[in-house]
Structures are given as structure tokens and as C-alpha cells.
Amino acid sequence: MQLYSTNNKSLQVSFKEALFQGLPIDNGLFMPLNIPEIPKEVITQLDKYEFQEIAFQVAKALLNGEIPDDDLKKIIDAAVSFPAPVNMLDEQTAVLELFHGPSLAFKDFGARFMAKTMAYFNQKTDKDLIILVATSGDTGGAVAAGFHQTPGIQVVILYPSGKVSPLQEKQLTTLGHNIHAFEVNGTFDDCQALVKQAFLDQTLRDEIKLSSANSINIARLIPQIFYYWEAYKQVYKKGKPVVFVVPSGNFGNLTAGLIAQKMGLPVQHFVAATNANDIVPDYLSSGKYNPRPSVPTLSNAMDVGNPSNFVRIMDLYSSTWNIVKSHISGYAFSDTETENAIQQIYHTHNYIMDPHGAVGYLAWEKYREEFQTEALGIIFETAHPAKFLEEVERILGQKIKIPESLQSIQTKDKKSTPIEVNYLEFKNQLLKSFKTK
């Protein structure tokens, strides 16, 4: 598999190189040089394939032999070990439940696949690999669970103090061992900027071996393609065009869907659903991209003011606004609208959605009304509602069931290192902790 930088198409690397570099040296993002098509005979008979078999077909086509088939199958079987079921709310509205993994969020797919591939390539080295990741909520817990106790890998998670839910914070600060949490006195954008600066600091990279587990890493993006195919498999015999509705923050999830479409997945349209951080919906409306500082909202995993993967979307469509908006519609909603939607979904469908899924529901309703479509909308429920326990219980006025995996961490002690938004301080912490390892 050959990948290039979005800043320079002649700067090309293998999948293994992109996996460990995280970012190209020119501060672009890695993209596949060629996006292969899945054979039509596979697409027309998707219902004959198990989820793991579909994931293997997609990964095999993309990686193009860089990991031998037998080894790739083992990685897929270990990473994709939980389902992604489609739940029908009505004849035109479906929910793709992506919260059945260990951290109860869609990012489990990417984190587990990345952990397995990194461990595969890193098994013959004697120097620890340091994973840097910024999180606005769910990424940290998924990465912590995916990489926990993986030999030869240390994980550093940066998260904005006071801006993730209590259960999200517990997931990334209580595991210990090779998982290290840095509590940043700032926003998610500040966390992300510190991570990017570290990757561009050659003096730091000369001292410690760095890689990324954010959606900027291509190994996070690839497994997110898998469940688009799995969702389509479950509904395509209904005979309706399919619209995917994706709650969006850093836009890696939606980018994965666009790549799936280029691989041959029959998708009619994509809907990007955001909260008050509506940079991409504004772009789709005006043609102007104006990033700005993020603002905190109820759907905190989407509190991103400058989505990293936007450059990948532009790269896919040669930065042509008319083409981008022909594939994607964007809508933004307030916290009040989100709360009302959670209540409406529960009372209408007897289904409890988390705030991010509720934003997706609102976007689907808006798109459905605007275009009078007969399509089937598949809304991504990206996290279990119990991860936002206090807010969801307040909104619904009742207790909700907490999965056992979350119950077990509630009494554990938080362990984190507080830091300011100061790159030199952060760099020194990294060198102090990992230079000799």
C-alpha cells in the first residue's frame, strides 16, 4: 500500500511507514495513492459474509499484500470481535450501533486494529513506541482499552480538563500500566496542537519513537471503513437508497465513508451532523472554510474547531466545493435542540440515544424534510448513552442502565498529569518519562 502526503503527492511511503510516522514530515495527512474497488460479485452478495470477512476483504484490498493474508486475518479477527448491529426505528430511519466494543464507542474499531497492526510491525524492535493521542472524549478511552498492556508500546493521552464526561475521564485515567493521561488546561484544539507540534519536532523524534492514534493516523481510518459495509449489508435487501448520517467532530468517520463509497459501496449521500462547532456545515453552505476555537457542548466528542480530516475530504475531491457538497450535506444543532431530540427519540421510539446520536437524528430529520427523500437513513450511534450518564438521566428524568464495563471503573482512582498549554513543558515531560526507554 502506497500513501502520499496531502501537501505533496510525490512524498510517498508504505503503510508501515505511515502507521508509525502518523503525520508526514510536511504536516500533511497520508492518503492512499490508489483506492481499490471491491468486486461487484462481493457487493451483490454481502449478506453471505460475516462482519470479519467483510473487514478482511476491505483491508486486503487497501493494504495490497503489505501484511500477509494469514497475519491480516489474525489481526482482523482480534480487532473486530464485536458486532455493529443496525436497529430500525421506522421504515426510513435506522441506527447503526457502534458502541458494542470494550470502551463503548465507535473508536474501538480503529483503536484495536491500530494496536494489533502496530504490535505486529513492532514485535522485532527493542525500543518502546510512544503513542501520542489527543481526545475530545471517546478516542482516549478507546485507545486506552485497545493498547492496554500491549508489549513495547506506551500511550500518552492528552485531554481537555473539565471538558470530557466523568465516565470518559475514568476510562482514560484509571488503567495505568502503559497508559499515561495528561490533563491539559485548555481545549481539545489545544491538545491536538500539542500533539501535532510534537510530531513536527525532529529533535524530540530523534530521542523517542513517536506515533499517533488519532484519526489523523491512516490505521485509525481504515477500520472505520469496515462498518459502512457491514451496515449496508444489513439493509440493502430493503431496496432503498442509503444515506449515512454521521455525527462529526474531526471528520475521520465521515472520511472513511467517502473512501468506502470510492471503493464501490452504493451510498446515495452523506449527512454531516455537528453541534455549535459548525465549521464544515458553514463551508458546505458558503464555500468558505473558516476554522475557529471550539466551544464546549453537550456532545463533547464533536467539540472541534478545526477538523483535521477536512484536508482529506478536500483531497478526495480536488478541493472542489461543488463536488464536495454534492456528496455531503451538513447541519448543526444547539444543545437545547439536542436535549429535545433525546426526549423525542425516547418517547417516539422507546430508544435511548446519546447526545451525538441525537444530533445525527436531528440532521436526518432535517435532510429528510428538505429533500423529501424516500431513502433509508442510517444514523451512527457513536457511543453508549451511559457514557454521558449524568446528562442523559437529567434529560430523560430517569435512571438508565449502566453496562458492567462502566460500572467497574466508577470507583477507581483517577491518575493524570496536569499541564498547561505549553509545548516546552509537554516536551520535557515526554523526555523525562520516555527518553531512556
Image (cartoon, helix red, strand yellow):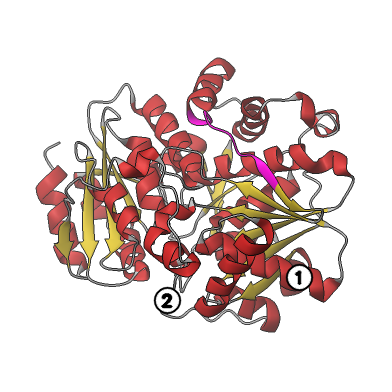
In which quadrant of the rendered view does residue 211 lie?
top left
Q: Nearer the viewer, residue 84 or 421?
A: 84
In which quadrant of the rendered view does residue 196 lie?
bottom left
For the C terminus, the quadrant is top left
Q: Which residue appears at 34% of the width and 52% of the height?
A: 133
Q: SS of the residue at dot 1? A: helix
Q: Which residues are magenta?
A: 79-87
Q: SS of the residue at dot 2? A: loop
**Is any part of residue 25 visible from this angle?**
no
Q: Which residue appears at 65% of the width and 69% of the height?
A: 362
- Give the amino acid at mark 1: Tyr
Q: Which residue appears at 44% of the width and 48% of the height?
A: 401
Q: Nearer the viewer, residue 170 or 19?
A: 170
Residue 294: which disc? 2
Q: Nearer the viewer, residue 187 or 409?
A: 409
Rendered position, 385 above or below 160? above
Looking at the image, tell me whether mark 2 or mark 1 is earlier in sequence order: 2
**Is any part of residue 45 visible from this angle?**
yes
Magenta stretch, main secondary structure, is: loop
| Rendering coords of residue 178 (x, y %) | 22, 37
- Disc 1 designates what residue? 367
